[in-house]
Image (cartoon, rainbow, N blue to C red):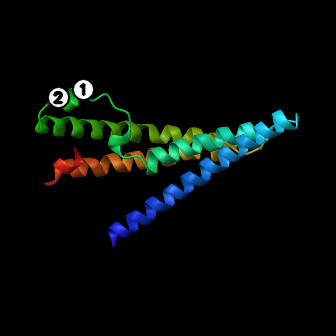
Amino acid sequence: MLSRLRVRAKQGAEAVAALLFAAMFGAFLLQVFTRYVLNAPLSWTLEFCLIAYLWTTFWCCAFLLRERDHIAFNLIYEGVPEHSRRILAIFGSLLLAVVFIAGLPGTFDFITFMAIDRTWVLQIRFDYVYSIFLVFMVVVILRALLRLKGLLGPGWRAEL
């Protein structure tokens, strides 16, 4: 049941990412067409593409990429024995969770403060634009804590 729910959640996250990317790509193609074919560029498409790119990036990093899919400098990590890798992974996950937890209140304050301003063309409030970063931070914290739990449990080798 839980694995089926996890598969459905991943499919939903993939669908949202695909829709965001398709919307961004469609706006980009529309901008190219109106600028170079009609010689009458649209002002909103660039802003829309930037917002869609921001949302696509943080959405995918939060919900679709696994820990090992992210770029990492792991030369030392890969060269040490398994038990040392476990200690490094525990330290890394704990550090990540602590740093993101420490940054959460300030990030929340800044994002809510940004409600006073809007984007220049589409007039979308900036707190809506940047709210995806708060979602990203919360998911990173939860994933780091879950990884930490796995690293401290009996099946810790699966987390490496």
Q: From the viewer's perspective, tell me whether residue 97 is left or right of residue 155.
A: right
From the top left corner, tell me how far across and down residue 106 is, in percent: 50, 37
Is any part of residue 152 visible from this angle?
A: no
Label 2 packing within 10 angstroms: few (<14), some (14-19), many (20+): few
Residue displayed at 68% across by 43% down? 115
User: What number of labels is visible?
Assistant: 2
From the top left corner, tell me how far across and down residue 66 is, in percent: 36, 46
Q: Quadrant of the C terminus?
A: top left
Q: From the viewer's perspective, tell me whether residue 56 is left or right of residue 81.
A: right
| Residue type of the residue flagged with mark 2 | Gly
From the top left corner, tell me how far across and down residue 27 is, in percent: 72, 44
Q: Residue 75 shows which numbered tag? A: 1
Q: Identify the residue at the far bottom of this view.
A: 1
- Give me the C-alpha separation between circle 1 and circle 2: 6 Å
Residue displayed at 25% across by 47% down? 148
Q: Residue 59 shows which numbered tag? A: none
Secondary structure of residue under mark 1 = helix
Q: Which residue is mark 2?
A: 79
Using the image as rendered, state which of residue 82 and residue 40 is in the foreground: 40
Tag 1 and tag 2, C-beta contact below 8 Å: yes
Q: From the viewer's perspective, tell me whether residue 77 is left or right of residue 22.
A: left
Residue displayed at 37% across by 50% down? 142
Label 1 packing within 10 angstroms: few (<14), some (14-19), many (20+): few
Secondary structure of residue under mark 2 = helix
Residue displayed at 37% across by 36% down? 99
| Residue type of the residue flagged with mark 1 | Leu
Using the image as rendered, state which of residue 63 and residue 35 is in the foreground: 35
Q: Quadrant of the N terminus?
A: bottom left
Is any part of residue 81 visible from this angle?
A: yes
From the top left corner, tell me how far across and down residue 51 is, in percent: 65, 41
